[in-house]
């Protein structure tokens, strides 16, 4: 029989993402709904090791659903990667009588949660929060939709100046290992070319496509590049490469960077976070552990944390085809 849960701890870990606050709110309020205690843990696993806890009740999370970032703050803890660090974290949880954890973060955070469970038997449930959308077991991660909207809005603005000067813009977006942001925002913003880590079609193909664009009468172009793209060239080197090979193009670079992680979450992310938070708490109260809450075909579903960590969320090849056709 799993131990009865009286108090749940919630933390955010790894890169922050819009919608994390909405997920914290949902966890806290679901605990209140079931009359159990909830504790916010600051700075992810760092705060777990330091015992940096705060009791949270329904009113502690008023007016945060619309805010980006995370009120609990986030960190990537080196100490939690050591058995000694995790031992201290366990002791701090015992002292504070926290029975279980909801971990909002990416696969690195889930790996830590799983090891912690295996070593100390603490029930853990993961909620996928990362703008990269690169987690297996869910169609969408928290923050991804907001980041897409941010990127599209910015590229729309870049297009204004690109077309005024007849320039080619190379725009770098986030996505260390995955091209979800580049591909979807690229299609949404009408980019002429999109370079992603999952598809290395070679730079000659890009040059050919840009030549075709010029011939077909396009005066300005946008190339969206995912930061994890595999050509081996930085965006600045890419710009130089294009200018050397196609002197008819005047090229500029824009690296969007961390602004993609900020901002008020979209309605989609707020709703998703609310649904995931409810499910996470209910799973713990049902005696479940080592699961990630995800969404598939608009249904909340669960995946074993071990699979979520190891599996790959594949990009939609059909969207690559759509992008190619649109770039005609
Ligand atoms: O949140 C994921 C991500 O945005 C990656 O795309 C990016 O490479 C990374 O975070 C950068 O994060 P940081 O600057 O916090 O290390």
Image (spheres, grey):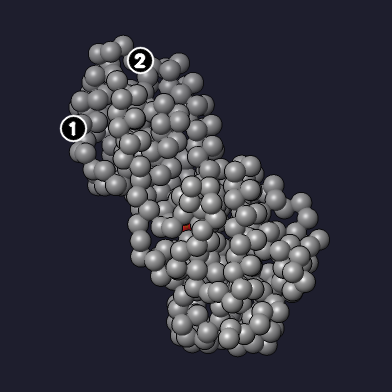
Which residue is denoted by mark 2 in the rendering? 219
| Position in image of residue 35 (x %, y %) | 77, 71
State the separation of the CA atoms marked 1 and 2: 20 Å
| Relative to 22, 192 lies left or right | left
Choose top left, top right, bottom left or bottom right for residue 214.
top left
Q: Camera-side residue: 300 or 42? A: 300
Mark 1 surroundings: few (<14), some (14-19) or many (≥20) residues within 10 A: few
Q: In this view, does 248 lie above or below 58?
A: above
Q: Is residue 328 above or below residue 136?
A: above
Numbered disc 1: secondary structure: helix
Q: In which quarter of the image is the N terminus?
A: bottom right
Which residue is denoted by mark 1 in the rendering? 204
Mark 2 surroundings: few (<14), some (14-19) or many (≥20) residues within 10 A: some
Residue at the image position 78 percent from the left and 55 percent from the top = 62
Numbered disc 2: secondary structure: loop
Q: Can residue 318 be seen in this view?
A: yes
| Relative to 314, 44 lies left or right | right
| Position in image of residue 185 (x %, y %) | 45, 36
Look at the numbered discs 1 and 2 and tell me whether their residues touch, using CB distance below 8 Å: no
| Position in image of residue 244 (x %, y %) | 22, 28
Q: In this view, does 99 lie above or below 128?
A: below
Q: Quadrant of the C terminus?
A: top left
| Relative to 132, 56 lies left or right | right
| Relative to 34, 284 lies left or right | left
Q: Camera-side residue: 129 or 15? A: 129
């Amino acid at each position: 029989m799993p131990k009865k849960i009286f108090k749940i701890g919630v933390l955010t870990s790894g890169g922050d993402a819009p919608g994390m606050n909405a997920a914290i709110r949902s966890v806290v309020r679901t605990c209140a709904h079931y009359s159990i205690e909830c504790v916010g843990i600051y700075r992810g696993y760092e705060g777990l090791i330091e015992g940096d806890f705060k009791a949270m009740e329904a009113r502690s999370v008023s007016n945060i659903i619309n805010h980006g970032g995370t009120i609990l703050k986030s960190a990537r803890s080196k100490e939690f990667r050591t058995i000694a660090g995790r031992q201290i974290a366990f002791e701090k949880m015992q002292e504070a009588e926290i029975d279980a954890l909801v971990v909002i973060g990416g696969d690195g955070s889930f790996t830590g949660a799983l090891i912690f469970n295996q070593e100390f038997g603490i029930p853990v449930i993961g909620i996928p929060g990362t703008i990269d959308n690169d987690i297996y077991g869910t169609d969408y991660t928290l923050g991804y939709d907001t980041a897409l909207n941010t990127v599209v809005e910015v590229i729309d603005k870049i297009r204004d100046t690109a077309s005024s000067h007849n320039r080619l813009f190379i725009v770098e977006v986030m996505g260390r290992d995955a091209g979800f942001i580049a591909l979807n925002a690229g299609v949404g913003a009408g980019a002429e070319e999109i370079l992603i880590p999952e598809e290395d079609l070679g730079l000659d193909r890009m040059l050919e496509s840009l030549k075709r664009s010029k011939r077909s009468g396009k005066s300005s172009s946008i190339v969206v590049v995912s930061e994890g793209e595999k050509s081996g060239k930085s965006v600045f080197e890419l710009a130089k490469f294009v200018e050397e090979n196609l002197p008819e193009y005047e090229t500029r670079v824009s690296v969007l960077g961390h602004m993609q992680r900020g901002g008020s979450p979209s309605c989609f992310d707020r709703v998703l976070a609310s649904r995931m938070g409810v499910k996470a708490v209910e799973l713990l109260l049902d005696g479940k552990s080592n699961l990630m809450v995800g969404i598939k075909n608009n249904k909340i579903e669960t995946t074993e944390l071990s699979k979520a960590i190891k599996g790959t969320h594949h990009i939609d090849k059909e969207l690559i085809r759509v992008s190619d056709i649109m770039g005609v």
